[in-house]
Image (spheres, grey):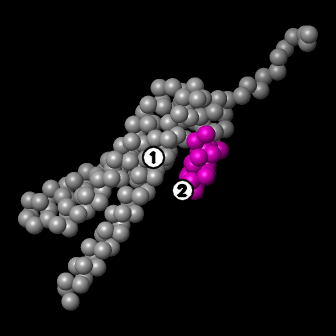
Amino acid sequence: MEGSHLANLEAVLTIAANLIEIVWIFSGGMLSVLFWVPKAFGIPDFSRKLFLHGLALTCLGFFFPSITKAIANATSDLEAVLAWGALILWLIVSIWLAATAYFLPSYLAVRVRKKERKLWIIALNVMGFIPLAWLVAYFWACMPEKSMHLRQGPIS
């Protein structure tokens, strides 16, 4: 009876690991593909950081199933401690990278571009769990502010 519970637990852990792998690879790949947007809108130094950030998320996605298998297959206490330590380190780095990627449009709007309508971008960013809202906030944050000043002087 206890063996079936362990098998079920291992199956759930494997499903969760595969789901996390897919999410990290997708989000990291998306950031890696969208790295050209800041460069196209005049923020060239930010593009390289964004590409490396996406690459790091993608790599973390590939490593997660290996870490969970190491935990499940640990035969000694030392192996289990090392595997759990790797998992905790993976979680800390992943949460940091995911949070910075999630709030990237807000950062661009407030710090880099100093947008007038930054509150709208932040509101869209908060709804970023909807991928389309995050993409709209990202593109809007990268676009330069259009000048609304009228030309003064005689019209020729």
- Quadrant containing the C terminus in the rendered view: top right
Residue at the image point whose x is 48% and y is 31% from the top = 47
List x then y, in percent, for residue 6. 22, 79
Q: Name which residue type carries label 2.
A: Phe
Mark sitting earlier along the chain (1/2): 1
138 in magenta: yes
Residue drawn at the location 22% of the way across and 53% of the way down? 86
Range of residues picked out in magenta? 120-139
Question: Which label lies toward us, 1 or 2?
Answer: 1
Quarter holding the N terminus is bottom left
Which residue position is annotated with label 2?
A: 129
Name the residue beneath numbered marker 1. Answer: 29
x and y, in percent, of residue 64 in the image = 30, 56
Asked if residue 21 is among those painted magenta in the image, a careful observer would answer no
Helix, strand or loop status at disc 2:
loop
Please state which amino acid type lies under the numbered disc 1. Gly
Q: Is residue 149 above or below residue 16?
A: above
Please say if 38 is above or below 71: above
